[in-house]
Each structure stands twice: as structure tokens, then as C-alpha cells.
Image: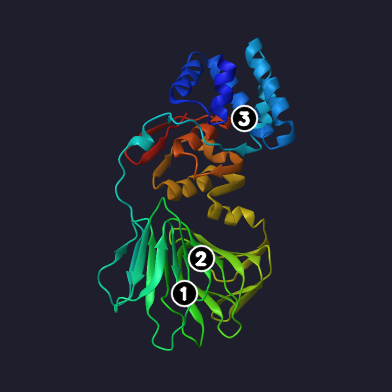
Amino acid sequence: MISNLITKYLNNQATEKEVELVFEWIAASDANKKEFIALKKTWVLTSIESETKEKDWQSIQNKIKSRKSFNYTTWLKYAAVIIIFITLGKISWSSINNKPKQENSIVLEVENIKEAINLNTNKQNILDVAGKVIAEHNNNEIVYKNEATTKTVIYHTLNIPLGKTFKVKLSDGTTVHLNSGTTFKYPKQFHKKGNRLVYLEGEAFFEVEKDATRPFIVNIADVDVKVLGTKFNVNAYSNNATYSCVLVEGSVTVSHTNNNSLLTPNQKASWTKTDKPFKLEEVNTDLYTSWTKGELILDSAHFSEITKKLERAFNVKIINNNEVLELQEFSGTINFKTSSLENILDLLKFDTYFEYTIKDNQIIISSN
């Protein structure tokens, strides 16, 4: 019976009662818990090879049915290299997701208009002062009408709170993905002549519509990222020590006063607030752009790097008092759109064990 329940649970097909039975079995003994951890990780890893998944999973079921001891440490060793986070059952392992959350709206500010617009509905029209529709808001995206102006440029500003992401299609056809905790300032309509100038604090992935006569410039404090048409990611949170620009496609120039650097695809330029010589290096761009798909790809990432990203993704504060944990490195993929923060922490601690408590909006990791 338990083998069938675990099969249904890992495939997200179990009922609420069946999920409860699985958790009861796990809690019945440490041996059951260790066995389940190893089996779940093996199931995830074997799912990578779809051709052999059914055969391998049948083997796992046979192990459960036989109830014989088996060597799960080898599985854990490989699972520690590739951590793939999947959505668990309908019941969370604690009440963090059941707590009422305060309204945390995405806000659109319009230049020369005092009252901001809360984008807290699924669909709405964005109007100018004359009542003309200039953009449409649909779920997590605003699309502006494709038009330019010969008049003075009027700026709009999007404020994306922690725990949310958003997308905006600008009036020139450029698409911008905005990460949580980001402020993005841009023209309602770009001018027909001159640069297409926008301002960023936070993180954004740009897919710039090509226009050779009007260069696209992203201003980050006193650094400009200049392009004609390309795809790139900018990370410029004000509380980060280092800013970066990662080029996926095309070419960009990062500049500060007389210091200019040209990036080619798969290159990253990084700099600090006080040190403007740009450091260039070859990188795997997926590590920097996967957030647009609701994922965080980790490659030997330290725990502090992971927690900083989780704090923004889930709008929480994580306090780590475990020095040993900080020395560990993690690799794999976290899907923060389909998994709860608690699920992610529980899976992380399978590889490097730690204890944590939840108090209000804080996750406190205790020292061992």
C-alpha cells in the first residue's frame, strides 16, 4: 500500500488524505524518513531520463515492498550534485503558507500625477490624463501601444515588491522582465529621435527591439549600458556590493566617464559602486537569466547567495546562525514559482542538515 501512495504522492496525484498517510509513515521512524529522502531524490534524478523512468521507478517500488535495507548513501552522494526541487503535495509541512499576507501590490507611478496605480487586478486599462488607453495590464504584464512621440517624454515608474516578478512591453516593442524588489523608470512613449533612455535599480532581463537610429540605454546610477538591439540581464540591487551585466545575444557597451567595455555573447561585466573599471569574464548565461522562468540555477553557490535570492523571491528575512552551513556549496535547480520556501529549505537540509524555525516573516537557522 505505501509504495502506491508514495508513487501517487511524487507524481502529485495523491489526495489530501493520502498525503497525510505518507507523512504519517515518514514520521513513524527515522528509518522511514531516510528511506523516503533517498527514494524521492532517486525518483527526481531518474526523471531526467524519461526513457528509463518507468523501469527505474518500478525498481524503487520493489525496494519499498521488500522493506529490506539498502544503501541510500550512494544515491545521496549523486543527489547532492544535482538537486532538483519539485512541487510537493497539497499539504505544507508547516503553516508558513497558511498565514495571512499583507497586500503587496505592484505599483505604477506616472510623472506629474500624484496618485499611483495599484496593479492588483487581473486586467485593467492604463489611461493618460486625457482618458486615452495607452497600455493594457493583464495578469503580470503591461503592454504599451506601439507608438512614439515628438513631444516632451513623460516617464512611468514600476515598483515591483519582494516576492513578485513582472513583465512590461515598452512602446518601442522592447520586452523587460522585472525581478522582485526592482524599480524601473521608462518613457510612456519614446521620442522619435534620440536615445531610448530608461533607469533601473534592481534586476531586469531586457529583450531590446533593434533601432539603429535610437540606441537603447539603461542607466544604473552612474553607469550606462548602451545597446541597439540585443538580450541581456542587469543585476543592480542597491544593497549588493557588486553590479553586473550579462550578455546573452548581440552586443552591449558598459560605460562610466572615460571607461568603456564592449561585451560579446556569454560575457559578464561586473563593477562596484566605487570601483568602475569593469571586470569581464566568460559565464554560463543560464545562471543569470533562469529567474525569468521561475527558476534559480545554482552552480557551487554558497548558502548566503542562495538565501539572498530566496529572501527576494519569497519576501522573507533569513537569519543564518550556522557557520558550517555557510561553507557548503550547492548545485542544482530551484523552482521558486511552484515550490514553497519551506519545501526548498527542507530539501536543502537533506544534503547539509540544519534546523530552522519560522517566526512571523523570519526564517531563523540555528547553530548546531
Q: Secondary structure at mark 3?
A: helix
Residue nearest the viewer, comparing 359 with 23:
23
Residue 2 appearing in the image: yes
Taking the image as shown, residue 129 lies to the left or right of residue 2, namely left
Q: Residue visible at 55% across and 71% down?
A: 276
* Label disc, if present, on residue 41 of the rendered structure: 3
Whole-percent x, y for residue 190 in the image: 46, 80
Check residue 176 in the rendering and tell me which mark sits there, or answer none.
2
N-terminal-most mark, 2 or 1: 2
Amino acid at dot 2: Val
| Amino acid at circle 3 | Lys
Is 157 rendered above or below residue 160? below
Q: Amino acid at mark 1?
A: Val
As drawn, the label of residue 198 is 1
Q: Are marks 2 and 1 in contact (CB under 8 Å)?
A: yes
Q: Residue at x 53, y 31 (%)?
A: 12
